[in-house]
Image (tube, rainbow, N blue to C red):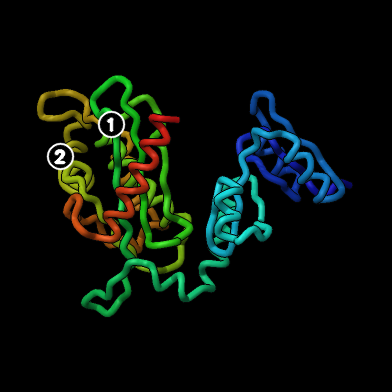
Amino acid sequence: MKNFYAVRVGYTTGIYEDVEDAKDEIRGYSCAEWKGFHRYADALEYMYENPNVTKYYVWEDLVFDEIDIAHQYSGGESCKVFFNLEDARGEAICEYGNCNERLSEDLLFVDAEGDTVYEVYTDGACIRNGKRDARAGCGVYFGANNPFNESKILGGTLQTNQRAELVAIKRALQLIQEWVNGEYYEIYTDSDYALKCVTEWCDKWERNGWVNCKGYPVSNQDTIKDILKLLNSVGCRNVLGIEKVLAHSDCEGNNGADELARDAAERHYYG
């Protein structure tokens, strides 16, 4: 009986110990590639044979997608290798959760009830916004070195700054939901549009069947609906709200989210 199942082309690549888990990742996937092995080393070698397999490198509580950058941080020491982001983040979180020095870099405040509330900053950026060749990105910032910080290219055909702002909020909620730890969170955005979409205008839009005052379908309603659903989910029950932060203010969190969003937009536009 084989002990390891390597999926190098499928929905989620990686090395699995349960054959059914591996099958779930290739069932219905066009041109999937997978194979079973007795030894982990052989499964690893099989994964490395395909240069197109995405690899993630974990050093302490940091995740990298480029080995050269990972080695800069590790001083050339060997890093743990993973073939999907979820597993890499899981390893980083284990390291991160045991490191008080790193935790002290998170952004937080103590509210009137004496509860610690962690601040999460979101931002969107778009190069050539409003043009046909526009490309956008999203940034989510939990604090320096936090493994859940995200610089994400905006998917889909609609590439606008407003959509990127909303998707960044959605990603923050998804990451909080993924990292359910009982802590309280407050999300910050510098976008009046995004904030009003999910805290003010949405009630009227829902009553009107998601058409605006001019009778047109509400733009970005798919993402707005996703955010509202997440806010009402069990996994986000400790999210206290979404607040406004001044754009381009001298605020570590907003600056961090802005940089992550701009980096993603530049990667998207320039390739």
- Residue name at image x 18 percent, y 41 percent: 193
Residue 229 seen in the figure:
no
Snapshot quadrant of residue 43: top right
User: Taking 234 as reference, is 7 above or below it?
Assistant: above
- Viewer-proximal residue among 150 and 4: 150
User: Taking 260 as reference, is 10 above or below it?
Assistant: above
- Residue name at image x 30 percent, y 76 percent: 115
- Residue name at image x 23 percent, y 25 percent: 130
Q: Secondary structure at mark 1?
A: loop
**Residue at the disc numbered 2:** 204
- Viewer-proximal residue among 131 and 205: 131
Snapshot quadrant of residue 120: bottom left
Q: Amino acid at mark 1?
A: Thr
User: Taking 20 as reference, is 254 above or below it?
Assistant: below
- Residue name at image x 64 percent, y 45 percent: 83
**Residue at the disc numbered 1:** 160
Q: Which quadrant of the figure contains the C terminus?
A: top left
User: Residue 59's x, y, as percent?
Assistant: 59, 60
- Viewer-proximal residue among 7 and 55: 55
Q: Secondary structure at mark 2?
A: helix
| 95 displayed left or right of 192 | right
Extreme residue in the top direction: 132
Residue 9 seen in the figure:
yes
Q: Residues within 10 Å of mark 2 (few under 14, many from 20)?
A: few
Q: Amino acid at mark 2?
A: Lys
Q: How many marks?
A: 2
Snapshot quadrant of residue 202: top left
